[in-house]
Amino acid sequence: MVKYLLRKNITYWYRRKINNYGEVVFSLKTKNHDIAMLRHSYIDYKINQLIYKGSFNTMTVSEIRQIIAKYKTYMIEEEYNDFEDMRDKDLSVTLNDKFYGGHTSEALDYAINRYKTIHEQNNLELVKQETNKILKRSNLQEDLEKLLTDKDKTIFHWELFKAEWDLLHESYESQKEVVQTTDKPLPTQDINMILQYQQMQKNHEEQVKEVNIIRISELVDKYISEKNNVNDWSDKNKRDIIYVLGNLSSYFDDSDIKKLHREDFVTFRDKVLRFLPKKSTKLIFRDKTTKEIIQIVKSKKLECLEKGTINKHLRRVHQVFEWAYNNDYTSKNLTKDLAFKESKKAKKQKTAKIPYTNEELKLLFEKSPWYTTEISKTLKNNPEHIFIPLLCLFTGAKPTELAMLQVSDIKTKEGVIGIEFNDHVKNHYNLRFTPLSKILLDIGFLNFVKYQKKLKYKQLFPAIKMYESGGTNFTNNYTIYNREFISQEKDKTFYSLKHLVNQKLKNKEKPLYIINDIMGHSDGYGNKDISVYGDEFMPNEILRNTINECLVYDLDFSKIKKVIILKYK
């Protein structure tokens, strides 16, 4: 507290070296130790604030001295100034019907005990009650008003409280004229007083340290809040972040992110992600901690995450901690290069997508129950089973994008009827307007849309339910249906329709930017010539003509058309 207080020729001085910026040195212009302590405490507090805020990075020593000059003028120029006079009045007390001035040992002892009580309660509001009294008799109020954050204000009040308590102690010792020598131990009362003061300092340091803590869960909240504000993300991204960072938080007891080391992230990869269940929504995992989930997976020998999924989760962790680093929450991102390396064969298998064959399309649209024997019943109870596969066949959209369509998403732009994909898309480049093909219009899709609108449905397919995992009951139903009536091949799924659309557009040698505009893909390279210069999308008429030209199939939709027109006439 007083390490910068020096005595030279019976006068007290303040002297402090600031690394790389020289020294702050000046006379405190007093021979009285109590007054010197007071002046030292407040001046040192101001310098600590400047260091804490990084002001010394841009200020010269001369400029620093100009800031401190107001303290010198107010507190140092006079041997006994108004501040000390007001302080004496504030500390005055009446004990047993006898008045004691604020400078007396009785008044100081009373004040010290009051500070002790406040310290024991460790209550910032009580601290503020005392410091507000000090602020009224000082010229520090304007400096407090400059502090913008709660953390800075907390530091201010605690430092001022510490300085005053230290001064009370020193004044009390001076009044008692206690002479300390190397061969005479301190009285027990004074030892306890010093220990109490040291404990108060420790508590304060811990409280200030607590202000700077950012736990994993808090970091996730901050990250999600910002991404939501800029609309740079989807619900699925949010769920993925919450899932993987939730497991990180659970495994490491929601640690302060600054206490995490590189080894912790390696442990999370090798001992957590590798043993998380492939199907995490099972009831046996509900309300379980990450450690408990891992124990269940191991004991029951359940199927775990694949390397590709683990790498996806590691990328999520990396992007959150990279954001934390860019926003000065951490000094370094320790999550780089954690992903497992995949073999060329694994990468090839991962990227290989198998479209339906024409024979499989016929099995689906001309022979399976949904579109033949059960079509009337299906249109009545689950029209999504009829229309979503058809919509995908002529738009290349994802099942979730189609499942969550609103009636109002079907609209006309520039004379072209199409679907506006705005909600429930994964990324910003998925936002698009995809024209409806001539075949879809011919089989009566707009009749169905008008029917739903007449029933005042907002959701185009109201029977569809969205799961927390990001999937839908339609996807589950189609998966079962696909295996029973269309294909037993592992790589043949609903996405076989989407990949077929992509392949047919490529086979017609259509430019990549037209394919991307239809299907909602990124070019993968951030090509400014395409995405920035000129209009963002191709004209809707060109997209419609491309769809009508390329997305032609050897299928007979006449029976489907007949039932749809009859149902929604």
Image (cartoon, helix red, strand yellow):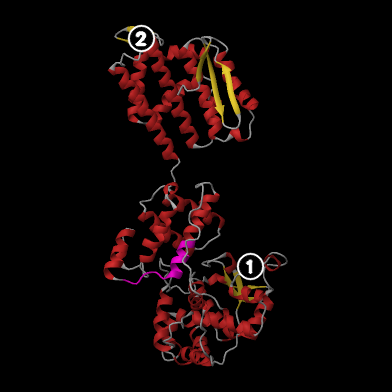
Residue 338 higher or lower than 432, as above or below: above
349 on left or right of 477: right
Above or below residue 45? Residue 275 is below
Q: Which residue occupies 59% across, 16% down?
A: 73
The residue at the point 41 percent across, 80 percent down is 479
* N-terminal label among 1 and 2: 2
Q: Residue furthest left?
A: 299
Q: Which residue is mark 1?
A: 525
Q: Secondary structure at mark 1?
A: loop
Rendered image: mark on residue 176? 2
Q: Is residue 462 above or below residue 31?
A: below
Label 2 CA crowd tier, 10 Å (few <14, some 14–19, many 20+): few
Residue 483 is covered by the magenta coloring: no
Quadrant assignment for the N terminus = top left
Give the overall secondary structure of the magenta segment: helix
Note whether 39 is above or below 495 in the view shown: above
Which span of residues is magenta-colored? 302-315
- When asked about the image quadrant of residue 529, the answer is bottom right
Residue 361 horizontal/vertical position (percent): 50, 89
Quarter assignment of residue 549:
bottom right
Find the distance from the CA under tag 1 to the CA under tag 2: 79 Å
Front residue (pair 3, 560): 3
**In the image shown, does 22 or 216 lie closer to the viewer?**
22
Tell me where residue 41 appears, x and y as whole percent: 48, 22
The answer, for residue 21, to whether it is visible in the render is yes
Give, as a three-letter code, the residue at label 1. Answer: Tyr
Q: Residue at x 29, y 71 (%)?
A: 301
Q: Residue 481, labelled with which disc?
A: none
Query: The residue under label 2 is which amino acid type?
Result: Lys
- Give residue 150's position: percent from left, percent from top: 48, 36
Depth check: 282 or 295 in front? 295
The magenta stretch spans residue 308: yes
